[in-house]
Amino acid sequence: MIIVQKYGGSSVADTDRIKRVAERIAAAKQEGHDVVVVVSAMGKTTDQLTRQALDIAPIPSARELDMLLTAGERISMALLAMAISEQGLSVRSFTGSQAGIITDAEHGKARIIDITPGRITDAIGDGHIVIVAGFQGVSRDSKDVTTLGRGGSDTTAVALAAALEADLCEIFTDVDGVYTADPRIVPDARRLTQVTHEEMLELAASGAKVLQVRSVEYARNHGVRIHVRSSFTYQEGTWVEEDHVMEQAIISGVAHERGEGKLVVRRVPDKPGVAANIFTSLADANINIDMIVQNVSDDGTTDISFTLPIDDGPRAVQLLEGLRDAVGMEEVILDEQVGKLSLVGAGMKTHPGVAARMFSALSDAGVNIEMISTSTIRASVVVREPDLETAVRAVHEEFRLAEVAP
Ligand code: ADP
Ligand code: ASP
Ligand code: MG
Protein backbone atom coordinates (compact mmCIF):
# COMPACT_ATOMS: atom_id res chain seq x y z
CA MET A 1 0.00 0.00 0.00
CA ILE A 2 1.19 3.52 -0.83
CA ILE A 3 1.41 6.10 1.90
CA VAL A 4 2.26 9.74 1.40
CA GLN A 5 4.04 11.48 4.27
CA LYS A 6 4.69 15.22 4.47
CA TYR A 7 7.27 16.75 6.82
CA GLY A 8 6.99 20.48 7.53
CA GLY A 9 9.81 22.98 7.98
CA SER A 10 10.31 22.54 11.72
CA SER A 11 10.45 18.75 11.27
CA VAL A 12 13.52 19.13 9.04
CA ALA A 13 14.95 22.29 10.64
CA ASP A 14 18.53 20.96 10.92
CA THR A 15 20.58 17.96 9.85
CA ASP A 16 19.91 16.08 13.11
CA ARG A 17 16.20 16.39 12.56
CA ILE A 18 16.59 15.31 8.95
CA LYS A 19 18.35 12.14 10.15
CA ARG A 20 15.53 11.51 12.63
CA VAL A 21 12.93 11.91 9.89
CA ALA A 22 14.94 9.55 7.65
CA GLU A 23 14.72 6.87 10.35
CA ARG A 24 11.01 7.31 10.54
CA ILE A 25 10.63 6.99 6.78
CA ALA A 26 12.87 3.91 6.77
CA ALA A 27 10.64 2.33 9.42
CA ALA A 28 7.54 2.90 7.27
CA LYS A 29 9.29 1.33 4.29
CA GLN A 30 10.38 -1.63 6.38
CA GLU A 31 6.78 -2.16 7.46
CA GLY A 32 6.18 -2.97 3.81
CA HIS A 33 4.68 0.29 2.55
CA ASP A 34 5.56 2.13 -0.63
CA VAL A 35 6.50 5.53 0.70
CA VAL A 36 6.28 8.90 -1.05
CA VAL A 37 7.57 11.77 1.05
CA VAL A 38 6.86 15.46 0.50
CA VAL A 39 9.24 17.80 2.26
CA SER A 40 9.18 21.52 3.10
CA ALA A 41 12.16 23.86 3.22
CA MET A 42 14.29 23.65 6.39
CA GLY A 43 13.05 25.77 9.32
CA LYS A 44 12.58 29.40 8.35
CA THR A 45 14.35 29.11 4.97
CA THR A 46 11.38 30.44 2.98
CA ASP A 47 11.15 33.54 5.23
CA GLN A 48 14.90 34.13 4.95
CA LEU A 49 14.93 33.83 1.17
CA THR A 50 11.95 36.18 0.94
CA ARG A 51 13.74 38.75 3.11
CA GLN A 52 16.85 38.54 0.93
CA ALA A 53 14.76 39.11 -2.18
CA LEU A 54 13.05 42.14 -0.59
CA ASP A 55 16.45 43.55 0.40
CA ILE A 56 17.37 43.62 -3.25
CA ALA A 57 14.04 44.59 -4.82
CA PRO A 58 10.96 46.02 -3.07
CA ILE A 59 8.76 44.24 -5.61
CA PRO A 60 10.83 41.32 -6.92
CA SER A 61 9.95 39.66 -10.20
CA ALA A 62 7.34 37.01 -9.39
CA ARG A 63 9.07 34.52 -11.68
CA GLU A 64 12.48 34.98 -10.06
CA LEU A 65 10.97 34.92 -6.56
CA ASP A 66 9.48 31.50 -7.32
CA MET A 67 12.84 30.32 -8.71
CA LEU A 68 14.44 31.44 -5.45
CA LEU A 69 11.88 30.03 -3.03
CA THR A 70 11.67 26.61 -4.69
CA ALA A 71 15.38 26.23 -3.97
CA GLY A 72 14.51 25.88 -0.27
CA GLU A 73 12.57 22.66 -0.78
CA ARG A 74 15.24 21.41 -3.16
CA ILE A 75 17.85 21.61 -0.43
CA SER A 76 15.81 19.66 2.13
CA MET A 77 14.77 17.08 -0.45
CA ALA A 78 18.35 16.27 -1.43
CA LEU A 79 19.61 16.18 2.17
CA LEU A 80 16.75 13.93 3.20
CA ALA A 81 17.46 11.58 0.29
CA MET A 82 21.09 11.37 1.42
CA ALA A 83 20.01 10.61 4.99
CA ILE A 84 17.71 7.82 3.81
CA SER A 85 20.47 6.41 1.68
CA GLU A 86 22.62 6.29 4.82
CA GLN A 87 19.91 4.04 6.31
CA GLY A 88 20.80 1.56 3.57
CA LEU A 89 17.64 2.13 1.53
CA SER A 90 17.31 3.18 -2.09
CA VAL A 91 15.78 6.55 -2.67
CA ARG A 92 15.14 9.07 -5.45
CA SER A 93 14.34 12.74 -4.98
CA PHE A 94 12.35 14.83 -7.47
CA THR A 95 11.55 18.51 -7.81
CA GLY A 96 7.87 19.40 -8.23
CA SER A 97 8.38 19.74 -11.95
CA GLN A 98 10.07 16.32 -12.22
CA ALA A 99 7.30 14.82 -10.11
CA GLY A 100 4.74 16.00 -12.69
CA ILE A 101 3.03 18.68 -10.59
CA ILE A 102 1.47 20.84 -13.32
CA THR A 103 0.08 24.21 -12.28
CA ASP A 104 -1.36 27.36 -13.82
CA ALA A 105 1.07 30.24 -14.34
CA GLU A 106 0.08 32.36 -11.28
CA HIS A 107 3.44 32.83 -9.57
CA GLY A 108 3.26 32.82 -5.78
CA LYS A 109 -0.19 31.22 -5.63
CA ALA A 110 -0.29 28.72 -8.46
CA ARG A 111 -3.04 26.11 -8.54
CA ILE A 112 -2.38 22.49 -9.37
CA ILE A 113 -4.27 21.65 -12.56
CA ASP A 114 -2.87 18.21 -13.34
CA ILE A 115 -0.49 15.60 -12.00
CA THR A 116 1.51 13.31 -14.26
CA PRO A 117 3.36 11.18 -11.72
CA GLY A 118 5.04 8.79 -14.19
CA ARG A 119 8.50 9.22 -12.74
CA ILE A 120 7.18 8.65 -9.23
CA THR A 121 5.31 5.46 -10.09
CA ASP A 122 8.36 4.19 -12.00
CA ALA A 123 10.61 4.88 -9.02
CA ILE A 124 8.15 3.16 -6.67
CA GLY A 125 8.04 0.22 -9.08
CA ASP A 126 11.82 0.00 -8.87
CA GLY A 127 11.57 -0.20 -5.09
CA HIS A 128 12.77 3.29 -4.29
CA ILE A 129 11.52 5.55 -1.56
CA VAL A 130 10.44 8.75 -3.32
CA ILE A 131 11.08 12.25 -2.01
CA VAL A 132 9.28 15.18 -3.63
CA ALA A 133 10.04 18.85 -3.06
CA GLY A 134 6.86 20.44 -1.71
CA PHE A 135 5.20 23.79 -2.51
CA GLN A 136 6.15 23.85 -6.19
CA GLY A 137 5.19 22.86 -9.68
CA VAL A 138 5.65 23.90 -13.26
CA SER A 139 3.31 25.77 -15.58
CA ARG A 140 2.43 23.94 -18.77
CA ASP A 141 1.87 27.28 -20.53
CA SER A 142 4.85 29.34 -19.44
CA LYS A 143 7.12 26.33 -18.69
CA ASP A 144 8.22 28.27 -15.61
CA VAL A 145 8.61 26.97 -12.07
CA THR A 146 5.78 28.09 -9.77
CA THR A 147 5.00 28.02 -6.04
CA LEU A 148 1.68 27.11 -4.45
CA GLY A 149 1.50 29.80 -1.74
CA ARG A 150 2.70 29.70 1.86
CA GLY A 151 2.09 26.33 3.48
CA GLY A 152 1.78 24.81 0.00
CA SER A 153 3.66 21.59 0.78
CA ASP A 154 0.48 20.35 2.46
CA THR A 155 -1.27 20.69 -0.89
CA THR A 156 1.55 18.92 -2.75
CA ALA A 157 1.15 16.00 -0.34
CA VAL A 158 -2.63 15.75 -0.62
CA ALA A 159 -2.55 16.14 -4.41
CA LEU A 160 0.03 13.37 -4.74
CA ALA A 161 -1.96 11.14 -2.38
CA ALA A 162 -4.98 11.64 -4.66
CA ALA A 163 -3.04 11.08 -7.89
CA LEU A 164 -1.31 7.95 -6.58
CA GLU A 165 -4.52 6.68 -4.96
CA ALA A 166 -2.58 6.41 -1.73
CA ASP A 167 -4.33 4.88 1.25
CA LEU A 168 -3.31 7.68 3.53
CA CYS A 169 -1.78 11.16 3.64
CA GLU A 170 0.17 11.76 6.84
CA ILE A 171 1.03 15.39 7.62
CA PHE A 172 3.88 15.51 10.13
CA THR A 173 4.29 18.82 11.90
CA ASP A 174 5.41 20.36 15.21
CA VAL A 175 2.08 19.82 17.01
CA ASP A 176 0.48 16.43 17.46
CA GLY A 177 -2.75 17.23 15.67
CA VAL A 178 -5.46 19.79 15.12
CA TYR A 179 -6.48 21.50 18.36
CA THR A 180 -9.57 23.40 19.49
CA ALA A 181 -7.36 26.53 19.23
CA ASP A 182 -3.72 27.27 18.46
CA PRO A 183 -1.99 25.49 21.37
CA ARG A 184 0.66 28.23 21.41
CA ILE A 185 -1.99 30.72 22.51
CA VAL A 186 -4.40 28.55 24.45
CA PRO A 187 -2.39 26.19 26.65
CA ASP A 188 -5.42 24.05 27.55
CA ALA A 189 -6.57 23.64 23.95
CA ARG A 190 -7.64 20.05 23.29
CA ARG A 191 -6.53 17.83 20.45
CA LEU A 192 -9.41 16.74 18.23
CA THR A 193 -9.49 13.03 17.45
CA GLN A 194 -11.38 13.67 14.26
CA VAL A 195 -12.57 16.65 12.25
CA THR A 196 -14.60 16.70 9.02
CA HIS A 197 -13.24 18.24 5.83
CA GLU A 198 -15.93 20.94 6.04
CA GLU A 199 -14.93 22.02 9.55
CA MET A 200 -11.21 21.79 8.80
CA LEU A 201 -11.75 23.92 5.72
CA GLU A 202 -13.35 26.68 7.81
CA LEU A 203 -10.67 26.43 10.51
CA ALA A 204 -7.87 26.63 7.93
CA ALA A 205 -9.58 29.46 6.03
CA SER A 206 -9.95 31.31 9.34
CA GLY A 207 -6.24 31.15 10.13
CA ALA A 208 -5.49 27.75 11.73
CA LYS A 209 -2.39 27.31 9.61
CA VAL A 210 -1.74 23.71 10.63
CA LEU A 211 -3.07 22.78 7.16
CA GLN A 212 -3.09 25.00 4.08
CA VAL A 213 -6.68 25.77 3.00
CA ARG A 214 -6.13 24.41 -0.48
CA SER A 215 -4.89 21.08 0.82
CA VAL A 216 -8.15 20.59 2.69
CA GLU A 217 -10.16 21.65 -0.35
CA TYR A 218 -8.24 19.16 -2.46
CA ALA A 219 -8.69 16.40 0.12
CA ARG A 220 -12.43 17.03 0.27
CA ASN A 221 -12.80 17.04 -3.51
CA HIS A 222 -10.77 13.87 -3.98
CA GLY A 223 -11.75 11.96 -0.84
CA VAL A 224 -8.26 11.90 0.69
CA ARG A 225 -8.01 10.96 4.38
CA ILE A 226 -5.47 13.10 6.21
CA HIS A 227 -3.77 12.20 9.47
CA VAL A 228 -2.16 15.26 11.11
CA ARG A 229 0.48 14.18 13.62
CA SER A 230 3.74 15.13 15.26
CA SER A 231 7.11 14.25 13.76
CA PHE A 232 8.51 14.41 17.30
CA THR A 233 6.32 11.66 18.83
CA TYR A 234 4.53 8.49 17.77
CA GLN A 235 1.23 9.59 19.22
CA GLU A 236 -2.01 9.28 17.31
CA GLY A 237 -2.95 12.67 15.83
CA THR A 238 -6.11 14.09 14.24
CA TRP A 239 -7.97 12.43 11.39
CA VAL A 240 -9.50 14.72 8.82
CA GLU A 241 -12.21 12.51 7.33
CA GLU A 242 -15.96 12.10 7.04
CA ASP A 243 -16.27 8.43 8.00
CA HIS A 244 -17.80 7.33 11.26
CA VAL A 245 -17.71 10.77 12.83
CA MET A 246 -17.51 10.08 16.54
CA GLU A 247 -17.24 13.58 17.92
CA GLN A 248 -20.19 15.60 16.63
CA ALA A 249 -19.52 18.58 18.84
CA ILE A 250 -21.39 21.84 18.26
CA ILE A 251 -18.13 23.78 18.09
CA SER A 252 -14.93 22.33 16.70
CA GLY A 253 -12.60 25.20 17.48
CA VAL A 254 -11.50 28.83 17.54
CA ALA A 255 -9.11 30.12 14.90
CA HIS A 256 -7.32 33.43 14.69
CA GLU A 257 -5.68 35.41 11.92
CA ARG A 258 -3.16 38.23 12.14
CA GLY A 259 -2.41 38.49 8.45
CA GLU A 260 -5.29 40.78 7.54
CA GLY A 261 -5.68 44.53 7.65
CA LYS A 262 -8.79 46.69 7.70
CA LEU A 263 -9.42 49.33 5.07
CA VAL A 264 -11.95 52.07 5.70
CA VAL A 265 -13.23 54.16 2.83
CA ARG A 266 -14.69 57.27 4.50
CA ARG A 267 -17.72 59.20 3.35
CA VAL A 268 -18.50 57.78 -0.06
CA PRO A 269 -21.76 58.87 -1.72
CA ASP A 270 -24.59 56.53 -0.73
CA LYS A 271 -25.87 55.72 -4.21
CA PRO A 272 -26.00 52.75 -6.56
CA GLY A 273 -22.75 51.72 -8.24
CA VAL A 274 -20.30 52.92 -5.61
CA ALA A 275 -19.63 49.55 -3.99
CA ALA A 276 -19.56 47.91 -7.41
CA ASN A 277 -16.97 50.43 -8.55
CA ILE A 278 -14.72 49.96 -5.51
CA PHE A 279 -14.84 46.17 -5.35
CA THR A 280 -14.59 45.63 -9.09
CA SER A 281 -11.31 47.53 -9.23
CA LEU A 282 -9.98 45.53 -6.26
CA ALA A 283 -11.04 42.27 -7.89
CA ASP A 284 -9.44 43.30 -11.17
CA ALA A 285 -6.19 43.81 -9.25
CA ASN A 286 -6.53 40.26 -7.89
CA ILE A 287 -6.95 41.48 -4.29
CA ASN A 288 -9.07 39.12 -2.19
CA ILE A 289 -11.51 40.82 0.13
CA ASP A 290 -12.76 39.09 3.26
CA MET A 291 -15.32 40.84 5.48
CA ILE A 292 -17.25 43.87 4.25
CA VAL A 293 -19.29 46.29 6.38
CA GLN A 294 -21.20 49.33 5.14
CA ASN A 295 -22.47 51.80 7.70
CA VAL A 296 -25.90 53.43 7.67
CA SER A 297 -26.06 56.52 5.59
CA ASP A 298 -25.53 59.92 7.15
CA ASP A 299 -26.11 63.10 5.02
CA GLY A 300 -26.11 61.02 1.87
CA THR A 301 -22.67 59.52 2.55
CA THR A 302 -21.53 56.34 4.19
CA ASP A 303 -18.35 54.48 5.25
CA ILE A 304 -17.39 51.15 3.71
CA SER A 305 -14.89 48.97 5.62
CA PHE A 306 -13.39 45.68 4.59
CA THR A 307 -10.54 43.35 5.47
CA LEU A 308 -7.87 42.13 3.09
CA PRO A 309 -4.45 40.44 3.27
CA ILE A 310 -2.02 42.90 4.93
CA ASP A 311 0.45 42.49 2.08
CA ASP A 312 -2.14 43.80 -0.37
CA GLY A 313 -2.96 46.83 1.84
CA PRO A 314 -0.67 49.47 0.30
CA ARG A 315 -1.63 48.41 -3.23
CA ALA A 316 -5.34 48.65 -2.37
CA VAL A 317 -4.89 52.13 -0.88
CA GLN A 318 -3.10 53.30 -4.01
CA LEU A 319 -5.85 51.86 -6.17
CA LEU A 320 -8.65 53.50 -4.18
CA GLU A 321 -6.84 56.84 -4.10
CA GLY A 322 -6.94 56.60 -7.89
CA LEU A 323 -10.74 56.28 -7.73
CA ARG A 324 -11.16 59.25 -5.43
CA ASP A 325 -12.47 61.65 -8.10
CA ALA A 326 -14.59 59.10 -9.91
CA VAL A 327 -16.23 57.80 -6.72
CA GLY A 328 -16.03 60.87 -4.52
CA MET A 329 -14.71 59.53 -1.24
CA GLU A 330 -13.28 61.65 1.60
CA GLU A 331 -10.36 59.46 2.65
CA VAL A 332 -8.97 55.93 2.68
CA ILE A 333 -7.56 54.63 5.97
CA LEU A 334 -5.51 51.44 6.26
CA ASP A 335 -5.47 49.88 9.74
CA GLU A 336 -2.96 47.05 10.17
CA GLN A 337 -3.46 46.65 13.92
CA VAL A 338 -6.42 44.31 13.69
CA GLY A 339 -6.91 40.60 14.28
CA LYS A 340 -9.68 38.23 13.33
CA LEU A 341 -11.18 35.55 15.52
CA SER A 342 -13.48 32.84 14.19
CA LEU A 343 -15.57 30.26 15.97
CA VAL A 344 -16.15 27.20 13.79
CA GLY A 345 -18.55 24.32 14.24
CA ALA A 346 -20.95 22.30 12.11
CA GLY A 347 -23.44 22.32 15.00
CA MET A 348 -23.93 26.07 14.61
CA LYS A 349 -26.34 25.29 11.77
CA THR A 350 -28.84 23.86 14.20
CA HIS A 351 -27.97 25.67 17.45
CA PRO A 352 -29.07 29.29 17.40
CA GLY A 353 -27.46 31.72 19.81
CA VAL A 354 -23.86 30.61 19.40
CA ALA A 355 -22.74 33.94 17.94
CA ALA A 356 -24.60 35.85 20.67
CA ARG A 357 -22.79 33.83 23.34
CA MET A 358 -19.48 34.59 21.67
CA PHE A 359 -20.22 38.34 21.66
CA SER A 360 -21.09 38.23 25.39
CA ALA A 361 -17.86 36.39 26.19
CA LEU A 362 -15.89 39.05 24.31
CA SER A 363 -17.74 41.84 26.05
CA ASP A 364 -17.07 40.24 29.48
CA ALA A 365 -13.38 40.10 28.53
CA GLY A 366 -13.49 43.82 27.66
CA VAL A 367 -12.83 43.21 23.98
CA ASN A 368 -14.50 45.56 21.51
CA ILE A 369 -15.83 44.09 18.26
CA GLU A 370 -15.18 46.15 15.12
CA MET A 371 -16.66 43.93 12.42
CA ILE A 372 -18.77 40.78 12.31
CA SER A 373 -19.45 38.19 9.65
CA THR A 374 -21.09 34.79 9.84
CA SER A 375 -21.64 31.74 7.66
CA THR A 376 -23.64 28.61 8.43
CA ILE A 377 -20.79 27.04 10.37
CA ARG A 378 -18.64 30.05 11.34
CA ALA A 379 -18.89 33.31 13.25
CA SER A 380 -16.01 35.77 12.82
CA VAL A 381 -15.16 39.10 14.42
CA VAL A 382 -12.45 41.68 13.89
CA VAL A 383 -10.89 43.09 17.06
CA ARG A 384 -7.84 45.21 17.95
CA GLU A 385 -4.68 43.14 17.39
CA PRO A 386 -3.43 43.48 20.99
CA ASP A 387 -6.79 42.08 22.20
CA LEU A 388 -6.67 39.05 19.93
CA GLU A 389 -5.08 36.51 22.29
CA THR A 390 -7.34 37.54 25.19
CA ALA A 391 -10.30 37.20 22.85
CA VAL A 392 -9.28 33.71 21.68
CA ARG A 393 -8.85 32.50 25.27
CA ALA A 394 -12.16 34.04 26.39
CA VAL A 395 -14.14 32.39 23.60
CA HIS A 396 -12.35 29.05 24.08
CA GLU A 397 -13.24 29.21 27.77
CA GLU A 398 -16.86 30.28 27.18
CA PHE A 399 -17.56 27.21 25.05
CA ARG A 400 -15.58 24.91 27.37
CA LEU A 401 -13.56 23.63 24.45
CA ALA A 402 -10.86 22.22 26.72
CA GLU A 403 -13.39 19.62 27.87
CA VAL A 404 -14.48 16.68 25.76
CA ALA A 405 -17.96 17.25 24.37
CA PRO A 406 -20.61 15.29 26.30
P1 ADP B 1 4.70 23.01 9.27
O1 ADP B 1 5.97 23.76 9.17
O2 ADP B 1 4.88 21.62 9.79
O3 ADP B 1 3.89 23.05 8.00
P2 ADP B 1 3.01 25.09 10.39
O4 ADP B 1 3.75 26.09 11.20
O5 ADP B 1 2.61 25.44 9.02
O6 ADP B 1 3.85 23.73 10.41
O7 ADP B 1 1.68 24.63 11.18
C1 ADP B 1 1.78 24.16 12.50
C2 ADP B 1 1.42 25.28 13.46
O8 ADP B 1 0.05 25.63 13.31
C3 ADP B 1 1.53 24.90 14.92
O9 ADP B 1 2.83 25.09 15.39
C4 ADP B 1 0.50 25.81 15.60
O10 ADP B 1 1.10 26.90 16.27
C5 ADP B 1 -0.33 26.36 14.46
N1 ADP B 1 -1.77 26.21 14.69
C6 ADP B 1 -2.68 27.19 14.54
N2 ADP B 1 -3.91 26.76 14.85
C7 ADP B 1 -3.79 25.46 15.19
C8 ADP B 1 -4.73 24.47 15.60
N3 ADP B 1 -6.03 24.72 15.71
N4 ADP B 1 -4.27 23.22 15.89
C9 ADP B 1 -2.95 22.95 15.78
N5 ADP B 1 -2.01 23.86 15.39
C10 ADP B 1 -2.42 25.09 15.10
N1 ASP C 1 8.29 26.33 2.62
C1 ASP C 1 6.98 26.85 2.26
C2 ASP C 1 6.52 27.82 3.33
O1 ASP C 1 7.24 28.09 4.29
C3 ASP C 1 5.96 25.78 2.03
C4 ASP C 1 5.60 24.94 3.23
O2 ASP C 1 6.31 24.93 4.23
O3 ASP C 1 4.57 24.24 3.16
O4 ASP C 1 5.46 28.37 3.22
MG1 MG D 1 2.58 24.44 7.17
Image: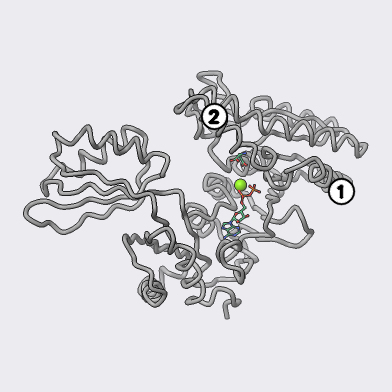
Q: Is residue 276 left or right of residue 251?
A: left
Residue positioned 41% across, 72% down in the render? 350
Image spot of residue 113 (x, y percent): 53, 32
Element assignment for label 2: strand
Residue positioned 62% across, 29% down in the render? 70
User: Tags 1 and 2 in contact by the CB under 8 Å rule?
Assistant: no
Depth check: give the residue in front, 386 or 125.
386
Element assignment for label 1: helix
Depth check: give the residue in front, 179 or 36.
179
Q: Residues within 10 Å of mark 1 (few under 14, many from 20)?
A: few
**Label 1 near ligand 1 (CB < 8 Å):** no
Disc 2 target residue: 103
Asked whether residue 371 appears in the rendered view, the answer is: yes
In which quadrant will I find the C terminus? Answer: bottom right
In which quadrant will I find the N terminus? Answer: top right
Residue positioned 15% across, 38% down in the render? 327
Depth check: give the residue in front, 204 or 300.
300
Where 239 sits versus 250, above or below?
Answer: above
Disc 1 target residue: 27
Where 111 sits versus 302, above or below?
Answer: above
Badge 1 or badge 2: first in the primary sequence: 1
Q: Where ligand 2 lies, by quadrant?
A: top right
Q: Cα distance, mark 1 to mark 2?
A: 33 Å
Q: Quadrant of residue 368?
A: bottom left
> Disc 2 marks which amino acid?
Thr
Asked whether residue 375 appears in the rendered view, the answer is: no
Image spot of residue 294 (x, y percent): 22, 54
Residue positioned 67% across, 55% down in the render? 228
